[in-house]
Image (cartoon, helix red, strand yellow):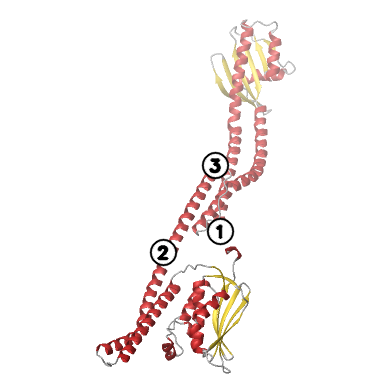
């Protein structure tokens, strides 16, 4: 930002200096013209005036213009033009003098033409009957323009014009210009600073916007105030900013999509590897059993019908376990590696729990388990009842496997508790606590605290992993806690949504 400010100041200073230079140049030009040209122009103008006056006097005396009294007309010319006029006849007698009170000055007019030592003269113009000189009186320091002309009738006319007025005028004019120059420089400087600021501010703003654009920040836009070139540039900067922002956003979206595709592909590859590894590991034992008993049947190891039936039952049981395990593993893999879309709806969780217990009645009776409920009759929740049913079933199945007698009774207790906007479902079973180091490991697929018990009960070690995957997809809490005389598993679920009825 500092660099932009420096550039803006540089432009402003340059504009200020340029405009100041223009103003000073104009004033200097006027002073030079006044000093060297104005006087010459004045001299040229007055020279023409003298000649036109000569022509007019010639017209009077030759009768080309008839007037009642020539002297009166000459008086008017003398007064109006500040001329001294003398007319002499052909006998060198003065027949008219405009300044009768100053005979000495009239004699000087005559003497000037004689060029005595008291005068300095310069010829300005010379024609057939006219000669104009610039004369300086060395005594009075007065400068005159003097015309001597011979009229058509032979008379001689002298017309004198004082030039001190023009010199004084030039001096006064120059002093006035100096004063004006000072005022113009001061006032103009203020105006120039304001104008340069007005001119450079949009450039600074556009520069700041461009710098932000370079840093991929397109939040600032130029406010167009006029139709000039700078505002047109600002408008084009806005258009470019919008197009760049759109293109970059599109590229970002494409990159995000590519990253998702890569991540999805990576997950799929990981899922395949994990699935193959888990299946190959977990199917070793049942495949070995099936292979062994199949070979026994083929080789007639036991020929009695009862043994053959036992072999067949073992093969069928292991095949059923394999099918169940593969199905669970496929479902778990989908939950862990795919974005599942749940069919959520409002339903009564208590009714679902009781239905699952009814379905497990045979298992519960075989194990001699007493199921207790601590809940109200209706607790409506919002979720996919199919997957929540899996969670409850897996917790209940796990509890049935590990329940043991405490105080002469096997108890499984299902409790529903409201915690803020969640319902917490807990499944407690009496029995031994889980060792601390295994509390976090039991959620891993195929982890079995008691390998022999799981094989006997047909467990695959996937049930709790499925609960974990479902809860992770929902973003809800789940876990296990050791309690006095037993173990308690729990998970949270969202309460019903009124807008989803």
Q: Which mark is residue 421?
A: none
Nearest to viewer (mark 3 / mark 2): 2
Q: Earlier in the sequence, mark 3 or mark 2?
A: 3
Q: CA gap, disc 3 to disc 1?
A: 26 Å
Which residue is the site of mark 2? 258
Q: CA distance from mark 3 to mark 2?
A: 45 Å
Vertically, is 95 above or below 484? above
Whether 220 is drawn above or below 302: the answer is above
Q: Toward the viewer: 200 or 261?
A: 261
CB contact under 8 Å: marks 2 and 1: no
Reading the chain from its start, which is encountered first: label 2 or label 1?
Answer: 1
Q: Residues within 10 Å of mark 3 (few under 14, many from 20)?
A: few
Can residue 121 be seen here? The reply is no
Left or right relative to 455: residue 56? right
x and y percentages locating residue 57 in the rendered image: 63, 11
- Res 282 visible: yes
> Is 433 left, or right, of 163 in this rendering?
left
- Locate residue 115, reporting x and y percent: 61, 22
The quadrant in which residue 219 appears is bottom right
Secondary element type, mark 3: loop
Q: Residue furthest left?
A: 299
**In whole angstroms, how far apart are the C-alphas of marks 2 and 1?**
36 Å
| In the depicted structure, whether residue 485 falls above or below residue 45 | below
Residue placed under numbered mark 1 in the picture: 1
Label 2 sits on a secondary structure element that is helix
Badge 1 density bin: few <14, some 14–19, many ≥20, Cα 10 Å: few
Of discs 3 and 1, which sits in the foreground? Answer: 3
* Whole-percent x, y for residue 425 in the image: 57, 78
Number of residue marks: 3
Residue ID for mark 3: 228
């Amino acid at each position: 930002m500092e660099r932009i400010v420096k550039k803006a100041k540089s432009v402003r200073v340059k504009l200020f200096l340029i405009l100041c230079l223009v103003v000073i140049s104009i004033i200097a030009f006027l002073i030079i013209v006044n000093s060297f040209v104005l006087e010459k122009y004045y001299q040229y103008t007055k020279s023409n005036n003298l000649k036109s006056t000569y022509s007019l006097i010639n017209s009077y005396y030759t009768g080309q213009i008839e007037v009642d009294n020539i002297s009166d007309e000459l008086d008017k010319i003398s007064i109006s033009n500040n001329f001294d006029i003398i007319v002499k006849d052909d006998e060198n007698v003065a027949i008219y003098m405009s300044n009768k009170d100053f005979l000495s000055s009239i004699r000087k007019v005559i003497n000037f033409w004689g060029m005595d030592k008291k005068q300095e003269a310069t010829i300005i113009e010379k024609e057939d009957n006219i000669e104009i000189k610039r004369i300086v009186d060395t005594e009075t320091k007065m400068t005159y323009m003097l015309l001597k002309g011979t009229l058509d009738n032979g008379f001689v006319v002298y017309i004198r014009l004082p030039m001190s007025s023009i010199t004084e005028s030039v001096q006064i004019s120059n002093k006035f210009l100096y004063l004006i120059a000072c005022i113009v420089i001061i006032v103009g400087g203020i105006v120039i600073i304001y104008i340069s600021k007005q001119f450079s501010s949009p450039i600074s703003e556009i520069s700041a916007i461009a710098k932000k654009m370079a840093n991929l920040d397109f939040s600032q836009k130029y406010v167009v105030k006029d139709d000039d070139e700078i505002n047109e540039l600002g408008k084009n900067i806005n258009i470019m900013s919008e197009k760049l922002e759109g293109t970059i956003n599109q590229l970002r979206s494409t990159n995000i999509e590519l990253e998702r595709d890569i991540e999805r592909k990576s997950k799929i590859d990981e899922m395949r590897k994990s699935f193959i590894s888990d299946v190959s590991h977990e199917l070793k034992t049942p495949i070995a059993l099936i292979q062994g008993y199949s070979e026994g049947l083929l080789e007639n190891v036991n020929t009695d019908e009862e043994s053959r039936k036992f072999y067949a039952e073992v093969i069928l049981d292991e095949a059923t376990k394999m099918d169940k395990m593969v199905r669970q593993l496929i479902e778990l893999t989908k939950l862990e590696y795919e974005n599942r879309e749940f069919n959520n709806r409002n339903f009564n969780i208590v009714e679902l729990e009781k239905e699952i217990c009814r379905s497990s009645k045979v298992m519960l009776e075989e194990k001699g388990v007493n199921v207790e409920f601590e809940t109200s009759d209706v607790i409506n929740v919002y979720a996919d009842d199919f997957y929540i049913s899996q969670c409850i079933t897996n917790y209940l199945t796990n509890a049935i496997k590990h329940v043991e007698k405490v105080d002469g009774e096997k108890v499984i207790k299902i409790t529903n508790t409201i915690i803020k906007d969640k319902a917490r479902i807990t499944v407690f079973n009496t029995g031994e606590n889980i060792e601390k180091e295994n509390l976090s490991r039991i959620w891993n697929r195929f982890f079995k605290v008691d390998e022999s018990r799981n094989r006997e009960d047909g467990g695959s070690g996937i049930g709790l992993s499925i609960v974990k995957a479902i809860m992770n997809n929902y973003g809800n809490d789940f876990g296990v806690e050791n309690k006095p005389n037993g173990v308690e598993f729990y998970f949270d679920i969202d309460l019903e949504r009124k807008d989803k009825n």
